[in-house]
Amino acid sequence: MRNLFVVVFLIAAMSISNAQSLSRVEPPNWWVGMLHNEIQLLVYGKDIALTEVSFEYPGVRLISIERVQNPNYLFINLAIADDTKPGSFDINFRISKRKTLTYTYRLDERREGSAQRKGFDASDVVYLLFPDRFANGDPSNDSYEGMADKFDREDLYARHGGDLQGVINHLDYLNELGMTAIWLNPVLESKQPWQSYHHYAITDFYNVDRRFGSNELYRQMVEEAHSKDIKIIKDMIFNHSGSKHWFIEDLPMDDWVNQWPEFTRTNYRIPAVFDPHASEADKKLMSDGWFDTHMPDLNQRNPYLAKYFIQNSIWWVEYANLDGIRMDTHPYPDKEFMAHWTRSVMEEYPNFNIVAETWVNYPAWVAYWQTGALNRDGFDSGIPTVMDFPLCYAINSAFDEEESWDRGLHRLYEILAHDYLFADLNNIFIFPDNHDLSRFMKHKDMAIGRYKLGMAFLLTTRGIPQLYYGTEILMDGDDANGHGVLRKEFPGGWPDHKRSAFTAEGRTKKENEAWDYMSTLLNWRKTATAIHNGRLVQFLPENEVYVYFRQNEEQTVMVILHNGYQPKVLKTERFNEILSGFTSGKDIITGKELNDMGKIQLSPRSAMVIELK
């Protein structure tokens, strides 16, 4: 009987050892000389927790090995001494005397000055680019076996083939237009079976989707953008992943995601997070409910997951040489974790910038999420930059309404009057539309005068402007008809397009008028320091005219927005507190010299941006 037990035991041990495998080590490498010099490696493979781990490398010390609920995971904590040299070493996972799995771990040298990299700021204008719909630079990667969401350009919710090579191919176009930064919607792997083209349901946080290119191509894109003085902002999502993510299909532990007895959707009520009267039930549903059925809600209170995301962010900044991060659905995850994450990234890169998606309705709700806010609950997010959705709504209404006490141009004035709430006025992200909202030119029949007024305001008021791809050529789309129409192919991005709006010859007369107007403002703005950091002085709109000034020690700029349909003469005595001492000016849009600042002739529905002399 005893011999039978020994035989059974040996067979079981052999089957375990033969089954063990090593599938992933994340982060896949690290750097010497980092502030974050204690890292946690997530190791994944069949029964990998049953192995013995060993390695030797001068300056690298094993702190601990942690085994969790699922034996397919192992967490290895390492300390990297400050004087450690770059190089590689083997981490050995011993199964038996005869079998060992090996992963070669690499410690790289950092770029010179990496820690002091400067992020995007109010001197920049950001071009939001939807990768699948901008340009198809490499048709060979349109489809891959094993990727369920298929290529079908007739379907607005399927893949159309836009990729990183398409972005690289048109960096000169963006440079000529006058853009200084690009925010790409996510490009990490998303192998969800349906509507994964937007990539907000990620299935691999360390790898670019092969249909966009590769990690190496992403890094090349950043390098080529930098050579043209264009910064790159990476879109990140930590609230949720895709349901087909490998660690969702084989959870490390039960509390890796927020679990409910049955599917439970978030209530999307962000105010519950900071409402002093909110019930615990509402707060929990807001933060722990799932964004959608195919987007499991990740539990950032789990310390392993928290460490995973902090390291992932720093890894991407260092690996790809990023200039900024845009954090999707920022108020939805655990807010204390998000504050810890932000501090961790900003400690590693003190001059970096992160913009949080703060999709809320009122300025006070936006201001809550910016670092330095005087919040009643004492919370400080650490986030430098927040997205100004209330101003977006005002921009989309102001030029369509007749003037009244609180309508028309008064909407812009009143939103900006709430700026006392913000800790840093330069770090407010402003925009007229994006990939989730109706385009600023919702319909083709909207007047170009409206467009010019909106763009002049956006590019001269306080904050960091963002433009959605195609805005420069009046691309239209109404969210009432679904998100697909907001994300149409850019004309000329595909070989079978009949024209290319990347060239003046391929644009219509009206598109060229819009493009030239935008380019004039953008290229002037690059050196307009008063717009970057000058104080904003605004005067109450009167008689369909809104006047404000941007001023610093180097420059004073007067902006006039005339929303009326008839020409008029603007008498300027009212503005003498700023105008006094200036005798002339130049309208940078038309190039016209103004030698009499006492009276200014205004054309119908027009903007003037006047450098004062």
Image (cartoon, grey):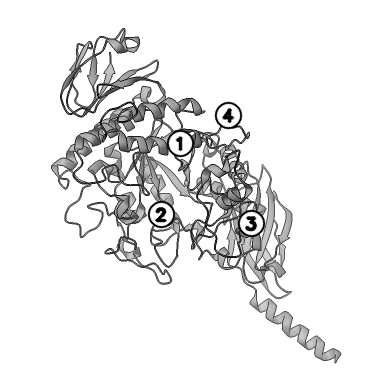
- On the question of residue 91 being in view, the answer is no
Measuring from the top left, give residue 221's x and y in whole percent: 39, 49
Say above or below: 40 vs 171: below
Say above or below: 43 vs 565: below
Q: Separation of disc 1 and disc 4 at Cα? A: 16 Å
- On the question of residue 363 being in view, the answer is yes
Q: Is residue 411 left or right of residue 40?
A: left
Q: Is residue 81 left or right of residue 563?
A: right
Please name the residue that numbered disc 3 is placed on: 41
Q: Secondary structure at mark 3?
A: strand
Amino acid type at circle 1 is Tyr
Q: Is residue 477 left or right of residue 46?
A: left
Measuring from the top left, give residue 312's x and y in whole percent: 56, 51
Measuring from the top left, give residue 177's x and y in whole percent: 27, 38
The answer to the question of whether label 3 and label 4 lie on touching residues, with beta carbons closer than 8 A, is no
Label 4: few (<14), some or many (≥20) within 10 Å? some
Please name the residue that numbered disc 1 is placed on: 362
Indicate which disc, 3 or 2, sits on the residue closer to the N terminus: 3
Nearest-to-viewer mark from 3 and 2: 3
Please name the residue that numbered disc 4 is placed on: 374
Amino acid type at circle 4 is Leu
Please name the residue that numbered disc 2 is placed on: 217
